[in-house]
Amino acid sequence: MYTKRPAISLSLIIVLVSTLTACANSPSSKNLEQSFAADPQLKGNSINLGQNVANPSPQNQLKTELPADFPTEIPRYPNAQLQEVTTTAPTTNTRWFTPDSADKIQAFYQQQFQSNNWQILDQPNQPTGSLAARLNDLKVTVAAVPTQNPGVTEFTIQYVKETPQPTAETTPENNVTASPTTEATPEIAATPTPKETSAPDATILTGTSIIFSDVNKAPKELQSYVSELGELGVLTPAKTAGKTDSESTIFEPNKVITKREFARWLMAANNQLQANQPAKQIRLANESSQPAFQDVPRTDPDFAAIQGLAEAGVIPSQLSGDNTALLFRPDAPLTREQMILWKVPLDTKLTTSGATFDAIKQTWGFQDTFKIDPKALKAVLTDFQNGDASNIRRVYGYTTLFQPKKPVTRAEAAGTIWYFGNATEGISAKEALKIKNQPNSTQN
């Protein structure tokens, strides 16, 4: 029995092989072959054990490199991977992935921009909003984008180098702009400023009275401030086509004010309201002063006011120890925090301690306290301590939002400089106007 079994098994194998060989070309054999063949959809798709099949395809995993001209001034988020770079001249857009949350990304860039003296142009209202900032001629926008993958945040960094506008120091003959840090030549320094460009300074010195025709367009609470400062000769009219400043009575109260305009008004208001107190007067800078800002040369029509405020320590500059304040950006919109930062030191001495974000939150109760530039914290806290004489209370009334980066209107700026002093001692434009109109007044 045992000796026959191997022979039987061998016989069966021979029979099966012969059968398959004989039927190799038959339809049934082809069906049998296909049933044992590998699935064609699996060809070329080798899967390693433990590999996540949901991972991106190999071509999406290829590393993308930053452009060679990627500005080094733009902060790099430490926990992000570059995914894509697209360029549509002159704008370049980079796309990144990170496991961190959108609010963490925004907080990082907010802190980096503020610490490195970027000008914040736009604040996000939510974590997925865009944060825009500018440094010199470089404009950057950071925006978080929601994704469908949990634990993954996409954000974009868009940047563009804006073409700088010609300055007053451009030489017409060769179109070459002198370096702002270079000392002006004797010829430039000796050349008197034309009459028409020095009109703002003349207004500061003479105080020409103006009755504006559109005061009623200002918020009701600010109308009297505009009128009284206009009569006092502090404010300048808005630019009107075909008319000079002396011919125009248009104020445009709701128009955004520039930094140069506010510096001019601040100087004029302080000196007009404090006319009987020489110790509180701010001196206009002279032509021999070394410019405090690279973009406000001696030839600038508002150099005397801006430089004078810087030399008095009212406007932060290199003269006051702020080595990051190299540029003034005179034609940029004035922000709320900048207005308070410049004005409060002329009202009272700044608080020397305790000016923290928590202190601002506890006193003012602002919901957006963390958006305030740390440089302005002392001024904002001191303004609260001024009680009813507070600039913020006078101009904005009750509010739980300071909106520190929001541009200031001309009417709001007027409301700020209408009064100088604290809650116990100070003077308003209304009082200064009465003194000026007295028969024996020395201000006329």
Image (cartoon, rainbow, N blue to C red):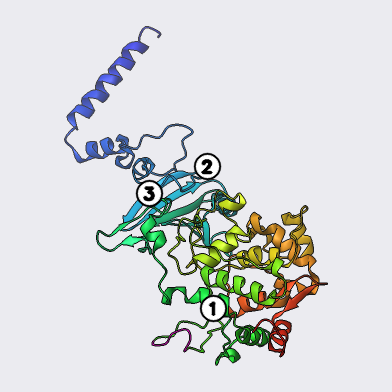
Is 120 or 258 nearer to us in this picture?
258
Foreground tag (1 vs 3): 1
Q: Quadrant of residue 400?
A: bottom right
The residue at 68%/75% (across/down) is: 275
Q: Is 185 on the left or on the right of 199, as rendered?
A: left
* Label 3 environment density (alpha carbons within 10 Å; few <14, some 14–19, many ≥20): some
The residue at 55%/63% (across/down) is: 285
The residue at 45%/59% (across/down) is: 295
Q: Amino acid at mark 3?
A: Glu
Q: Is 387 on the left or on the right of 144, as rendered?
A: right
Q: Amino acid at mark 2?
A: Asn
Q: Secondary structure at mark 3?
A: strand
- Mark with earlier residue (1, 3): 3
Q: Amino acid at mark 1?
A: Thr
Q: What label sits on residue 203 in the rendered view?
A: 1
Residue 341 belongs to the span the image colors magenta: no
C-alpha span from label 2 to label 3:
16 Å
Range shown magenta: 242-247
The residue wearing badge 2 is 79
Residue farthest toward the top in the current orientation of the protein: 3
Could you tell me residue 354's position as x and y percent? 78, 53
C-alpha span from label 2 to label 1:
54 Å
